[in-house]
Image (cartoon, grey):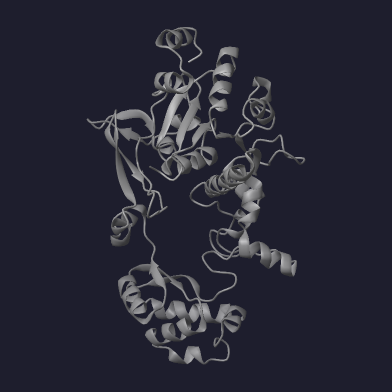
Amino acid sequence: MGALSHLRVLDLSRVLAGPWSGQILADLGADVIKVERPGSGDDTRAWGPPFLKGANGENTSEAAYYLSANRNKRSVTIDFTRPEGQRLVRELAAKCDIVIENFKVGGLAAYGLDYQSLKADNPRLIYCSITGFGQTGPYARRAGYDFMIQGLGGLMSLTGRPEGEEGAGPVKVGVALTDILTGLYSTVAMLAALAHRDQTGVGQHVDMALLDVQVACLANQAMNYLTTGTAPRRLGNAHPNIVPYQDFPTADGDFILTVGNDSQFRKFAEVAGQPQWATDPRFATNKLRVANRAELIPLIRQATVFKTTAEWVSQLEAAGVPCGPINDLAQVFRDPQVLARGLAVSIPHALAGSVPQVASPIRLSATPVEYRLAPPMLGEHTEVVLEEVLGLGAEEVRQLRSAGVL
């Protein structure tokens, strides 16, 4: 039994932030019912190629993007633009602990599926709304997407090569990080609301915004600005507060050096054959190294090119200096630590025999994550959910399907 196996979640969200949060709850044991549009479903079902390959190597209908955020859920297709569909969703919500939605502000009120409407039938309900800008403020009714929020929220101003270098300019992060972080924060918020409900018996509305999360996750860079009044600039792979903490060239590629304190710098200098760096009045402390970054980094780059990446990693690890290679994803999933931690799993799938998944990073000793269900095919569980949760008979389900509600 998963840690959250006593909970039922109605997932009305699509794309990534909401589904990511729903998948976390599902991995922890919650019964997550994903409500999708008949005929098309979650937008990401069509966000391919790549698509999952069938037994004979042919493309199936399941896009890899969709498969990344929807395992352990049950898919139900309901057209809630129609009164009969609205009734079904309201009845499902009345039997759920959590609702997750990411429609525009006020978008579900027209269907009677907003928080106030559902709360009337289920005062214990936790209702999580995920939008680009939140339920209030001058941007509240705007649509918000990860890429746009990375720009608006400052992350891209910090990401990319410095001005004056070849290829300089703002760059987005290589995954939809703002969506992912919003999904994580939303999960934390819902669990906090559940803890409050345990004490009071009353649910609440959770208002999550991509922009809020993006700004909150600027972390030390935000504080660098707030404490100085000077906006940080792009440094490429360098760190604004620690030196050396970036990539360096080697005889056969590149590696990452992450020196976190003065002791580690002394050890690095010894391995590099330049022990005098550790006592140089320009470099002896991190504060000095940050101030004299422009002098130190070229010296290090001149030294690192004389050994291979493997030699640097081996020698520096032996000396206790944090470092590592720059892997592509093929190398990541062959890495012995990744293999030892079981970060790639496989789940049986009706169309392909099995579907690969990236494992949850959550490790609980008493209630471990379980991989019960592959990301569902569109409407795969419509009949069983409506019969099991709402008690509908097979004939009523057939009539609803014939009428185009399901």
Residue 189 is situated, as x and y percent measured from the top left of the image, at 59, 46
224 relative to 387, above or below:
below
For the point 59% across and 78% down, which residue is it? 290
Residue 233 is situated, as x and y percent measured from the top left of the image, at 64, 64
Residue 111 is situated, as x and y percent measured from the top left of the image, at 64, 20
Q: Is residue 154 visible?
A: no
Residue 120 is situated, as x and y percent measured from the top left of the image, at 67, 26
Q: Residue furthest right?
A: 138
From the viewer's side, name the closer residue of 324 and 191.
191
57 relative to 155, above or below:
above
> Image quadrant of residue 164?
bottom right
- Which quarter of the image is occupied by the N terminus? top left
From the viewer's side, name the closer residue of 14 and 301.
14
> Image quadrant of residue 252?
bottom left
For the point 49% across and 11% down, which residue is it? 404
Q: Is residue 165 visible?
A: yes
Q: Residue furthest left?
A: 56
Figure disc tally: 0
Residue 351 falls left or right of residue 90: left
> Image quadrant of residue 144?
top right
